[in-house]
Image: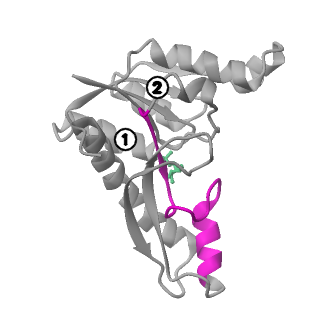
Amino acid sequence: MNRLVVLISGNGSNLQALIDSVAGGDLDAEIAAVVSNRADAFGLTRAEQAGIPTKIVDLKAVLATGRNRIEFDADVADLVAGYQPDLVVLAGWMLVLSEAFLNRFPGRVINLHPALPGTFPGTHAIERAHAAFQRGEIKRTGVMVHRVVPAVDAGPVVTLEPVPIFPDESVAELEERIHHVEHNLIVAAVDLVLRGDV
Ligand code: GRF
């Protein structure tokens, strides 16, 4: 059985999409664990409700012990490796992961990002796309899942879906439509990678 470890930092609606697809038999995998860098992430509740083991990693606490960011990444990699993942899925994980983590899972870390390749890397991508639309710079944005490399949101694309932006729609309305696309795309992306189709 394909084993997934999912990393989150917040609400976990994309994690929920994965949980539901596994439970519904639409994804030939099991979620071995959910790891969050925030103890207040609602995604942890979602995991617990699904009977999935959870772990919390606290960057500030690790740094306070004198360990550095690279050592933190290595610690998280040790934790994740313990679950023997076939694929590590970053679903709203908000920390940049260095090679100290990525090199432990070569080609087996994917990330969901609410923008098209080469546009709006980093945080607040949806708001930035909406503002760019208001300035007349873009007509649409999108969602992608990509393999993770050290450069932020810049790895080889697994799959993507363009999302049109409508005149006069608010950021919240655009965000709602984008999240709906994400919930389908992340399941499709995991399936593609696990099948070796991409
Ligand atoms: C999603 O928009 C994802 O693309 C971005 O963070 C958000 C996470 O949402 N990286 P959720 O926690 O899965 O609801």
Instruction: Report whether 73 appears left or right of 172.
Output: right
| Quarter of the rendering occupied by the N terminus | top left
Based on the picture, tell me whether residue 131 belongs to the magenta stretch. yes
Q: Residues within 10 Å of mark 2 (few under 14, many from 20)?
A: some
Most extreme residue toward the left is 25
Tell me what residue is drawn at x 42 percent, y 67 percent.
177
**Segment colored magenta:** 107-133
Q: Quadrant of residue 22?
A: top left
Based on the picture, tell me whether residue 60 belongs to the magenta stretch. no
Q: Looking at the image, how many numbered discs can be counted on the residues?
A: 2
* Residue behind mark 1: 16
Q: Quadrant of residue 16?
A: top left
Q: Give the spatial CA distance, label 1 vs label 2.
A: 23 Å
Percent from the top left, x then y, of residue 101? 58, 25
Q: Which numbered tag is attached to residue 105?
A: 2
Tell me what residue is drawn at x 57 percent, y 71 percent.
171
Percent from the top left, x then y, of residue 146? 45, 48
Above-or-below relation of 133 to 8? below
The kind of residue on which mark 2 rests is: Phe
Tell me what residue is drawn at x 45 percent, y 50 percent.
156
